[in-house]
Image (cartoon, rainbow, N blue to C red):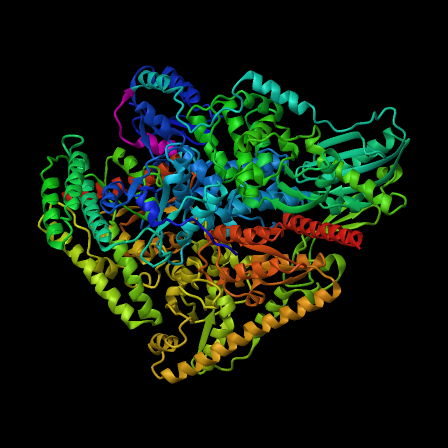
Amino acid sequence: METEHAVFTKEMRRDGYLILVPNMLDFHFSLLSPVFRLNGYNLEVLTNDGPNVVAEGLKYVHNDTCVPALLVIGQFMDALHSGKYDLDHVALMITQTGGGCRASNYIFLLRKALKKAGLSNIPVISLNMSGLERGGGFRLTLRLVRHVFAGAIYGDMIMLLSNQTRPYETEKGRTDQLIRAWREKLVEQFKRDRGLSRKEISANLEKMAGDFAAIPQKGPKKTRVGIVGEIYVKYSPLGNNHLEDFLKGQDCEYMVPGVIHFLQFKIDNRIEDIRLYGGNPLKKVFCEAFLKFVSRFEDSMLAVLRAHPEFVAPSSYAHTKELVKGVIGYGSKMGEGWLLTAEMLELAELGYPNIICTQPFGCLPNHINGKGMIRKLSAIHPGINIVPIDYDPSATKVNQENRIRLMLAVAADAQREQTEGDAK
Amino acid sequence: MYRIGLDIGSTTIKCVVLDEQGTVVHKAYERHFSLIVQKTREMISDLDRRILKGEKGVLNISGSAGMGLALGTGISFVQEVYATKAAADRLSPGADCIIELGGEDAKILFLKGTLEVRMNGSCAGGTGAFIDQMATLLGLSNPEMDAEAARAERSYTIASRCGVFAKSDVQPLLNQGAKRADVARSIFMAVVNQTIAGLAQGRPIEGRVVYLGGPLTFLSSLRDCFDKTLGIEGICPENSLYYVSIGAALQPSQPLKLSDALEALELFQGSETYAALPPLFETEEDLRAFRERHALDKVRRADPDTYRGDVYLGIDSGSTTIKSAVITAQGELLLTRYQQNSGDPVPHVRAFLTDLRRDHPDWVIRAGAVTGYGEEMIRRAFRVDFGVVETVAHFTATKAFLPDVDFIIDIGGQDMKCFKIVGGTIDNIFLNEACSSGCGSFLQTFASALGYDIATFADVGLSARRPVDLGSRCTVFMNSSVKQAQKDGADISDISAGLAISVVKNALYKVIRCSRPEDLGRRIVVQGGTFLNDCVLRAFENEMGVQVVRPDIAGLMGAFGAALYAREWRALKPGESSVLSLKELEDFTQQVRQTRCGLCENHCLLTVSLFGGGERYISGNRCDRPVSGRTGEEEWNLYAWKQKRIEALCARDTGEGKRGEIGLALVLNLYELLPFWHTFFTALGFKVRVSPFSSRKTYLEGQHTIPSDTVCFPAKLAHGHVETLIRQGVQRIFYPCMSYNVDEGLGDNHYNCPVVAYYPEVIAANVPDVKNIDFIHDYFGLDHPRTLPQRLHAVLSQRFGDLTLRQVRFACQKAYAAYESWMAESRKKAEEMVRAARAEGRQILVLCGRPYHVDPEINHGIDRMITGLGACVVTEDALSAHMKRAPQHVLNQWTYHARLYAAARYIASQKDMHLVQLVSFGCGVDAITSDEVREILEGAGRIYTQIKIDEITNTGAVRIRLRSLLAAIEQKKALEEKEASHGN
């Protein structure tokens, strides 16, 4: 059977093919375009939204496939059919996590969709850490990896700081203004290959914390909500029906765990696999070293935050992992795996016990790690207030919002009781 | 100061006014027919005039439909479940648990201990709406249905996952002649099971239980079903309809003048914020041209008043309607009849035949044929000469219309059938699965709920300016989307057009899975009653960008085709027609009785119809045994062989067991690895106890601890299996987590799917009784034979200190050997079966699935159905070893699925083998595999058949699908033989 598909070649790179990428995390992904340009790629993060994205997804992807695939592929198709792009000089890039979840198959579904639409000449680039689909004109060079990695750390920090600042800013828009300023500053540094070493990152993070802390704030603490879930619907506004905007409108402060933990989790899985099933000890040593390396950057971020008690700092990866011990096995690694369960415990511990657990309708790993664990988590943490929300192109927004409102109403009650209790 | 609470639900508005003391001084309850703003204004202005008289008051809105309204007008909003809780705190102190069912949502509140509030997931919506729909189907009002249910003597198993699934089970029950009372009660039981399975999630519903909401207030039989199932006596308190409104009224908010609220409501009207699609027709001219074009497609007719001579009869006994046609010897249409079957087709057919015989004594009925769900029963009742599979009937009719047709799409009330025609034979068949069933009748029900007949409803839709985008998941989702759109200001025309578009998208993207018109061919015929709706027809043409042919008898094509079929066959088999004479029709009697079949442990509930002519018709059976007396064709059934072998293994005496007893749950990853673990533990000196095959009871016993209602049915059964073992007194259960399965070298990796891999974690976290035993659910990898003994030893030696690594290693060796020979045996057995089948010229169907599809409760006896149809059944794992690993268009990384691809490639190369894939509802992985398997087969010019299964017990649709497949195979074979003989 032929598995021919268009490959992104060196010539295409030289000819400045435009690489399209679906959006997921607003700030993190806003760094991608300049970072890739610095490394010799022409890249654009898609921002198209609206009903046609869903319509295209439903048209080209098996309708029982989970919503991230429908939306990501729908977003690509909508863009390709929009007439905005020169279809002879465009390539698509998609991340591929690997692992036993069906998400590892998105790239294949994308290729099938392209074929169905008669666009199979458009190359698709897989961005992954598992060594899937090597070769071609796209190479993860050390420089590019450093840029992307630093971008992820900065992204996590900015997401954390801004989420804790924006709800309380006295002057509307100050936080977002600061985010834009930082983006420019970082891009400038990247151009000179600065801001990449641990020392420079530390210094930047320190300044960031200072800058955000300096935004004038007021008001009593708002209802604190945590967001966990399948990585795409958790982060992507397109995936979660603009959940964050909704929460802003509900007068909430929310925390969304960062992507670095997910990266650490993915590395750690390989170590756990060897621990559980045996395997190459060298690989284990390498992964342990890699995990340690990433964790050092995490430490820097936490160290900065320790000096700024005005911000709630996330737990270290090690601590988050420890929290879930005995709740679910570390072998549960597909999708977000045990990390999802752990993050719910982490958020509760950090004072965000009101949790929205987002998942695509019918998400397989979340039957286990999300919905499957809620019962146990309530026993461990009686105050925990979790609402699982399914996302699907055919699910109505009202239904989702109504359930979130219920969670918020319970949260408000608990908060009231607590303040009354404190007053006594 | 008065306090007002308005509860605007999906179908009704409830309103209360409380005085200073919190006493209810006024209450009102009305259906709003989606005219929410208008009804709300009427209610408020009425309150202002009669009670508040211009005074300020507190006004709070609650309810799912009130949310948008409250936000748009600035009136304060209270979430409805929260409101319920507030009301319960005051009105029902001491309640432990509240069950509230509404039109769309079901809710459970646990008040004692840790507060937990739950609403149903999106897939299980539409409780009240579902009961309404079912009452319509039964031809009863809600109170009548309630009264009927109270008289029930038994209840049938009805799928409880959702309304669409349940309907698929109810419809055939009615057609088979089950008593309405029993069906009514079964429907209520399904609601109860759905509520418990979806919302209890491991927390016991006990103590003082309070019932709230419309359905539970009005339907005493429904309350009774809850009481019986939960083993409690719940109470339906005073004001049970008004808890939400009372709770809302109790919340603090800024008092306001009602006239101000009215003003805000006035301004709110007319905001169209729903997602809209382009109109069906841009201009009047387009519509005219469209109508003129389609008016041309007419069937040849003869004048019934002047015709004398031979006629042929066709009857299509569908799920909700009966269509009949009579044709002349030349194939011209003489007369037709279209009737609702009101759940009992026999009297209607009798009336039709009596009229036919009486009104046209000079017509000679030469032969008749029946098709559709009711084929067997109608055939027997009236001794009709022939029976014909629906697909063949439809194809026959279409050929008469357009001989060189390429593609036929038929959308009826319940089912969609599409076939691709190549070289005059059916080349591929696409039939909908449960999720997209009922689209056609949904249009009808919806129209009538809004007070329209379907024709007017369609007409209105043609002029829609902004059709509503309703998605395409299923009618439960569509229903809730419509309600949402209505609230956002969509009018009837937009909804009518939107529904039509949604039905078409369902057919195209879910059933046929095509995205380009080229996939369908040039000459497309659309038929089925649903296509008589011009909106549906136009939506189809627009969506595909093609012009299609719709016969003027689109709704009668099945019957017309059956008549043509009868004519064809009479020519081949000359003789007299056996259709009942006028006298026999007048003397016709039918007796129905229910009985339990005692021929095997399934104990199917049989419905036996005895007809005056001495004919008997049995339904409700899963196998042919009660009908034919045969014990099934087990020598042609690898599934049956596997079941027997598992039973034998379970029954094997494993001795006293010096280390005590260990329980193995026969589910998911343990199904195929049973010989491995059984041998392993026996070798270590355990007495092994395996849970028996699943039954309905297994499911019901475990349903209250299922945390995720959208997980697949095989996983849901795991709860019952573990509970069964615990109830049998097993103190130690072994159920391993396994990211990886055995590596058979067929794929790029050898994962299990997440559910198969980690379901033990869910059991450990949600089945309360597991805490009282030793539940071993650590992670093991059978793909690492060298490290596995160490891991097992580490885990087991914590319990058994004397266990040595050597012993474990030895046991592992034996276990691997047992597993290997187990698998080899089944490959060998399959080979024998295939060889024997080939010697007899039997068709071989490869019923592909997962190892756990061997479970009779999961496969619903589909294996036996196939052997009953005369084919041989083997499994994918027995064939996959014929192939080597090959690249696929997908990431081939799951062990079980790699077998599927390999088997598909093998089958594609074998002329007399055909693939049927069993897919469990909710199996996300199969969304990927089914497309790929289909591509492999279609690439080789073969038919791909998928059967989606869940807890649904109705296998009528499956039967039609399998018969269609076999009919298409036969036809193709006949054609090939003909060509071959011509060649000679």
> What segment carries the magenta color?
B244-256
Residue B883 picture location, percent across and down = 55, 65
**Residue B827 seen in the figure:** yes
Which of A95/B483 is in front?
Answer: A95
Residue A81 picture location, percent across and down = 42, 34
Which of A6/A259 is in front?
Answer: A6
Q: Is residue B903 above or below residue B335?
A: below
Quadrant the N terminus of chain B occupies: top left
Displayed quadrant of residue B263: top left
Residue A335 picture location, percent across and down = 36, 54
Q: Is residue A188 left or right of residue B216?
A: left
Q: Is residue B248 magenta?
A: yes
Residue A327 picture location, percent across and down = 31, 61
Q: Is residue B372 left or right of residue B690?
A: right
Please report the residue visible at 61 percent of the width from the left and 25 percent of the height from the top. Answer: B453
**Residue A348 seen in the figure:** no
Please report the residue visible at 83 percent of the width from the left and 49 percent of the height from the top. Answer: B614
Q: Is residue B712 magenta?
A: no
Q: Is residue B880 left or right of residue A165?
A: right
Quadrant the C terminus of chain B occupies: bottom right
Q: Is residue B945 above or below residue A78?
A: below
Q: How many marks?
A: 0
Q: Is residue B66 left or right of residue A416?
A: right
